Image (cartoon, rainbow, N blue to C red):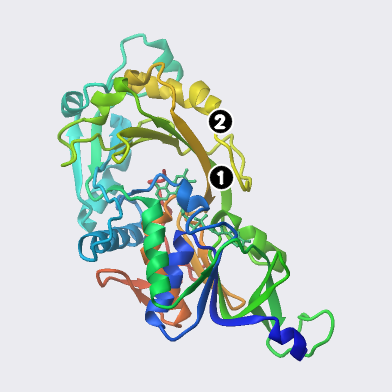
Amino acid sequence: MGQGLMSAMSKYDVLVVGAGVLGLSTAYHIKRENPERSILVLDKLGGPGQGNSAKSVGAFRNVFSSRTNFLLADSTIDFFTHVQEDLGHDLGLVFHGYLWLLSGRQYRRQEENFKEMSRRGVELRTWEREDLRRMIPDLVTEFEEGDEEAEVMGLEPVERGLQGVKCGSIDADRLVRFYEEEFRRLGGEVRYNVEVKRLILKPERELGLPGEPFVWQDASVKGVETVRGEEIYADRVVVAVGAWANTLLNPIGLDAFMRPKKRQVFVFKDERLERLFHSEGFNKEGVVPLLILPKAGILIKPEVSEGALWIECADNLGRPFKLEDDPQPELTYYTGNLYHVVVKYLPCFRDVQPVNMWAGQYALNSIDKTPYVFEEAGMIYVGAGSGSGLMKCDALGRIAAALYAGEKEATLYGGRAFRVSDLSVKERRVERETFVL
Ligand SMILES: Cc1cc2nc3c(=O)[nH]c(=O)nc-3n(C[C@H](O)[C@H](O)[C@H](O)COP(=O)(O)OP(=O)(O)OC[C@H]3O[C@@H](n4cnc5c(N)ncnc54)[C@H](O)[C@@H]3O)c2cc1C
């Protein structure tokens, strides 16, 4: 490497690519534990969390079938509460709850899971059909004899509701700004509108020959080259670019173990939905919990700050894995598809049009639906949020910081220990998640 070239380059202790919620949480925790180290965060967009963190519906829950996901989310929710209540940052936290509307068959299939969750300390409330009818008068729990539509669509009657209590919503924008501000306050540096073109792989012992690294050389990621041709080097590079991870990892032969999947959100605010929105008895806000319909993974979230209901669907089959920089919502996806299920269970949505809609992308690990944190070729990868990265962000940041420090165990907020390698590829130890949304 020539002297002239060296002077045009910058060098940091840590370089984090991606200022989404996972990159910022990781940068913050590494900086908090290593205040003397120089850390730079880069993002191709113009501000914090403007990738898929901004597209999220900001919901959180500690109701997961896998112990790993429970720990990641439960401790992160405790951290959110600490930030808002003890540190005085308003994150817009609302504990409205999640309510799974279940047929008898679905309830029985998951009954053992519910018992196991309760043993773990997950607070669950069960509501019988009569309770649901009283508390959500707009909900149809049974279909009329001979209702052909319901039969053709395979819709089952709602027998029970299972409410997760430590569940609710957070303002995603305030959350990413919290991490960014705290990181900067500790002396961290953030640069926006800087797109990384490639990860720079270099041999440990550079010979200065063309074609390096050769197969016989030990090589690792030493930095990045931006689309403007700037080279930025660091002792450790963290890649937290969410759904874009394969664009940086694949060219150097690494795998991000996730694939991008489009998700759409439709916003409803209409007087015909007022009674549903203000369902009483589930939480102190007097709002309907986030409802999960018994069919097709359709969820309806109360957005308390707007008095609106947001509809999203966790569909899979029939829709491609595909990376899109600016995915567009499709109105017909709602009107010609989700709508038919929604109005059968909640006729108050009949003829109500969305007032807003958007689309984003999940970084989906379709094997165990659980994030990855691992080190490979000197690079730390934090990703595969799988649709619930926001609600696990604090735990993932702490685990990545422990990996950076070479520790075997991370201490999650509240003091629980987490084996760092559990989220790796080589020593992965997680259970397949069955409560996916
Ligand atoms: C519709 C929708 C609803 C969701 N709802 C929820 C929810 O309710 N609860 C929940 O917990 N999660 C939810 N999620 C998932 C959640 O949004 C993600 O898990 C989380 O935001 C992932 O954070 P991240 O930092 O990995 O990714 P991102 O926020 O996408 O951050 C990655 C960043 O990397 C940057 N980047 C990419 N490539 C480059 C490059 N080459 N150079 C520089 N920068 C680059 C991007 O600009 C981006 O800012 C939802 C997602 C969607 C799409």
Q: Nearer the viewer, mark 2 or mark 1?
A: 2
Task: Say which residue label 1 marks.
Answer: 261
Answer with mark 2 or mark 1, whichever residue precedes in sequence.
1
Q: Which amino acid does label 1 sit on?
A: Lys
Q: In which quarter of the image is the N terminus?
A: bottom right
Residue at image x 20%, y 50%? 123
Can I make out residue 175 in this image?
yes
Residue at image x 26%, y 30%? 277
The percent coordinates of residue 394 (x first, y second) are 37, 64
Task: Tell me: residue 64, above or below residue 208.
Answer: above
Mark 2 Cβ and ligand 1 under 8 Å apart: no
Task: Say which residue label 2 marks.
Answer: 330
Q: Residue 291 sits in which quadrant?
A: top left
Residue at image x 29%, y 59%? 80
Q: How crowded is mark 1: few (under 14 residues within 10 Å), some or many (20 or more)?
A: many
The percent coordinates of residue 392 (x first, y second) are 38, 59
Task: Tell me: residue 335, above or below residue 1.
Answer: above
Outermost residue on the top side: it is: 146
- Determine the CA span between mark 2 and mark 1: 14 Å
The percent coordinates of residue 8 (x first, y second) are 70, 81
Q: Residue 343 sits in which quadrant?
A: top left
Mark 1 Cβ and ligand 1 under 8 Å apart: no
Q: How many marks?
A: 2
